[in-house]
Image: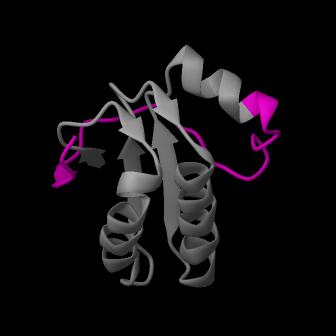
Amino acid sequence: MVELSQGKRLNTLFSGLVREQLQDLLKEQGISVIFNLEGIHFIDTAGFEVLQEMTRWALLHDSQFKLCNVNDDVRELVLLLELEGNLTFCRCENASERVLMVLD
């Protein structure tokens, strides 16, 4: 499981760094990455582009990329932007965590 450190937003300021770190994790074929969005209250278009790109990246590398703990505000944005078919959601399970180091 992966989560952001010290962030309430996934936006243009952080999307490049998040992309790089997630791609590094998803390079390993067959890996399953769960991105914990707990505490994230806003995602802009750049953030959603990263999430969609990581979903496609995982598929190309026979891996999985899923989102969990999506709050109501973010879920509403997903619906408004009609992205529900482009992202995969799951329930968070106990897993070892790796924190993406992103400063707020």
Q: Is residue 94 left or right of residue 81?
A: left
The residue under the point 17% across, 49% down is 96
Applied colour scheme: one colour
Residue 45 in the magenta stretch? The answer is: no
The residue that appears at 33% across and 25% down in the rendered structure is 39
x and y percentages locating residue 98 in the rendered image? 18, 54
Left-right relation of 65 to 27: right
* Residue at horizontal 50 percent and vertical 59 percent from the top: 65
The stretch drawn in magenta includes residue 83: yes
Residue under the point 36% across and 83% down: 28
Furthest-front residue in this view? 13
Using the image, determine if residue 65 lies above or below residue 38. Answer: below
Q: Percent position (x, y) of residue 55? A: 59, 63
Q: Quadrant of the C terminus?
A: top left
State which region is magenta: 79-104
Q: Residue 77 appears in which quarter of the rendering?
A: top right
Magenta span main SS: loop
Counting labels gives 0
Residue 18 relative to residue 44: left or right: left
Image quadrant assignment for residue 5 = top left
Vertical arrangement, residue 72 with respect to residue 95, above or below: above
85 relative to 58, above or below: above
